[in-house]
Amino acid sequence: MTERTAGGTDGEGAAEQPQPDLQAAFTAGLTRLRGLTGGLTDEVLRAPSALPGWTRGHVLTHIEGVGLALARQARYALRGRTIEVYDGGRPARDAAIEAGYGRPAARLSAALADALDEAETSWAAVGPGDWGRPVAYRDGTLRTVGLAWWRELEIHTVDALLGAGPSGWSPQLCTHLLDFLSVRVPGGVGLTVTAVDTGGVWTFGRGTPVAVEGRLTDLAAWFAGRRPEEPLEGGPLPELGNWP
């Protein structure tokens, strides 16, 4: 059994956790998403996603946009330069999603495939000694933005409701999500979460003790604001705060 207290809030997990192999994680995530998005139809894309108010087309258009934006962070970092994540910031990002989600299936699929190819190529160029290079994203490093791409890719693949669920998330991703999202635990709560399938135990915050148990993937889904596939036990579950 692993027992520990949550580390910092910089999004890179607690210090004692080994750094994930992001290159392998990107390959696995891209392979999964590509396997789910072959043969998309207009009907499939217009169906609701797991995100309120968004269709599957919205989600896949967002993956397209964020994949290109974060890949650009990598390309510029390797040149020793930094650049804004989105030209025009968040408003431009939102406008691109609204303009793109209703495209015919063939056009959306082609654009998504091109974006995933660009992301794959850009991140493959990052070598072992490059992860500390500075980026504009959160004034962080290439590892910071690489972790963000990992989260975006895996979580939104589930959000698209094309057949992937949180149960497909790796233990490494789930552990990272628990660490990164531990800042969502409200003040005044001492939350202990136990993964009944792996034996892992995490303690976050200080205050009124609350104990929650479930599969590791379901705990990670809850922390990420997604619906666990199997019910969590214990509680009562505290209301989690905003994403960092």
Image (spheres, rainbow, N blue to C red):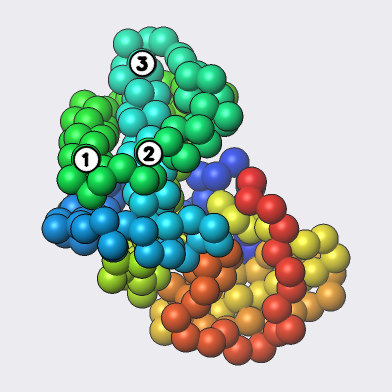
Q: For the residue marked with disc 3, what is the amino acid?
A: Tyr
Residue that appears at 44% across and 39% down: 97
Q: Nearer the viewer, residue 202 or 87?
A: 87
Mark 2 → mark 3, Cα distance in angstroms: 25 Å
Residue that appears at 70% across and 84% down: 235
Q: Nearer the viewer, residue 112 or 175?
A: 112
Q: For the residue marked with disc 1, what is the amino acid?
A: Arg
Whether residue 42 is situated above or below residue 208 in the rendered picture? above
Quarter of image, res 193: bottom right
Q: Which mark is residue 76?
A: 3
Tags 2 and 3 touching, CB below 8 Å: no
Whether residue 67 is situated above or below residue 230 in the rendered picture? above
Mark 3 → mark 1, Cα distance in angstroms: 28 Å
Quick check: can you spot residue 149?
no
Q: Which mark is residue 100?
A: 2
Q: Position of residue 137 (x, y in %)?
A: 51, 27
Of the two numbered discs 1 and 2 on the same chain, state the one appearing first in sequence: 2
